[in-house]
Image (cartoon, grey):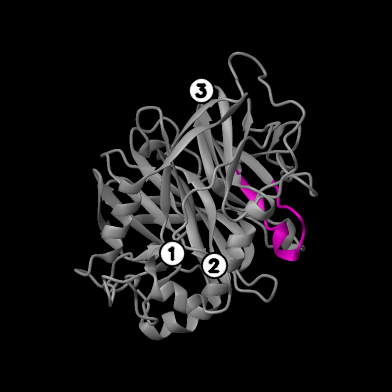
Amino acid sequence: MPDDRRAQQRTGAWVGVLLALVLAAVLLTALPGDDDGSDGASCPARTVASWSADDRLTGEFVRYGDDPVRADDWTGGDGTHSVRLPDGRLLWLFSDTYLGHVYPPPNPAGESHAWRDTTAPLVRNSAVVMSGDRLDTTLPAPLFADPAPDQWRWPVAARVEPRAPGSGEQVLRVLLWVRTAGQSPWIYGVPTATEVATLSLPDLRVESITKVFDQQLVQDPARRVLFGTTLVEEGGWTYVYGGNDAQAVGRPVSSAYVARVPEGRLAEPAAWEYWNGGAWTAGEGPRAVLGDGRRTGVGSAFSVVRDGETYVLFTMAAGTEGLSTVTSYWSCSPTGPWKGPTRGFSPPLPRAGVAAYNPQVHPQAGADGRLVLSYDVNWLEPTGAAAQLSGNVSLYRPRFVTLRLAPAR
């Protein structure tokens, strides 16, 4: 854990990171396509039929974050991802994270909120363990050390897989985004590389970190692709999705890409294959599976889940609802074509002036046919952002909804 001085030095830059990530997570879309029907009985169009706020799960992060017993545990973060471990525990992964103390509202009877000191430690990533329905442990943070000066790692999607194909031993593999400090417009870091960390089970010790997709030779940072915003396990393959950062330089949209890796080989760069628009290949650069460069596309933070034979992609909607409304696309294949967007919904926000971003589905946290979806929240305006995040800890914690999918009509 860094000392308070280091945290203070990084707070200003980090606020810029947050605000830019909010904007990067926005999806700019066209109107729904002409063909929103089914491609067959086995792959029907899917849309959100109903949803409701998951106050229990949201409240558990409030309880844990506000707990004053420890001074080195999680009190807030974004970049929310999760993975179920073989022993039943649920591991929650976060990008930029506040540690330290949270103090009770100075006026509980009024509208004041729990707050943290402006010198609270800030780290680039963290992991919190949930046993049953209760969060109980923050692993020593940061879990993934900075790879070099002025670089950092953000954990994204993760899965448990065999140590090698056919092995009886399981390990946890976590996708990492490496970013390098840069000048405007790259105030949230220049996309640099995708890595895979291998962690032992059940003790969650980081054994190794391997670079699987290096983008440093791509001259235009807006065209660099980082993989791991979401993944889908299917038929002995892991389909890993990623995006570029075109929006950082004022382009209308970013694009989505997909790679696949045989089960047990996520940490082997030579095992990765990329969709080039017509075939899987290891020798060519990936081609976008969603995003036409003008009207349709995604930000760097979106989520894909398989519902029956249909793949469903969740991201933020466009226009005036872009920082408040979640929408979705659907496809019969992990490579597309993706159709939609379908009807969106606007999950609750803690107050005016707050943005929602990074919608992530947590399939292993749902039950009774319902999906759990998290979304991160953050103060929208740059003026006074640091004070807002310290003065109201609820502005930088994940929130959750549960939803049901049904055939689109």
Is residue 149 something one can see in this rendering? no
Q: Is residue 277 above or below residue 138?
A: above
Tell me if label 3 and label 2 are in contact, CB under 8 Å: no
Residue drawn where x is 37% and y is 44% of the image: 54
Q: Quadrant of residue 275?
A: top right
* Element marked by disc 3: loop
Whole-Å distance between the Cαs marked 1 and 3?
34 Å
For the image shown, how many numbered marks are present on the structure?
3
In the rendering, which numbered label is found on residue 299? none
Tell me if label 1 and label 3 are in contact, CB under 8 Å: no
Q: Quadrant of residue 337?
A: top right
Percent x, y of residue 96:
46, 66
The residue segment tinted magenta is 241-255
State the residue lying farthest toward the left.
69
Q: Amino acid at mark 1?
A: Tyr
Closer-to-camera residue (215/383): 383
Nearer mark to the viewer, of 2 and 1 = 1
Residue drawn where x is 30% and y is 38% of the image: 86
Asked if residue 253 is among those painted magenta in the image, a careful observer would answer yes
* Element marked by disc 2: helix
Q: Amino acid at mark 3?
A: Gly
Whole-Å distance between the Cαs marked 2 and 1?
10 Å
In the rendering, which numbered label is found on residue 396? 1
Instruction: Name the residue carrying label 2.
Output: 18
Closer-to-camera residue (65/87): 65
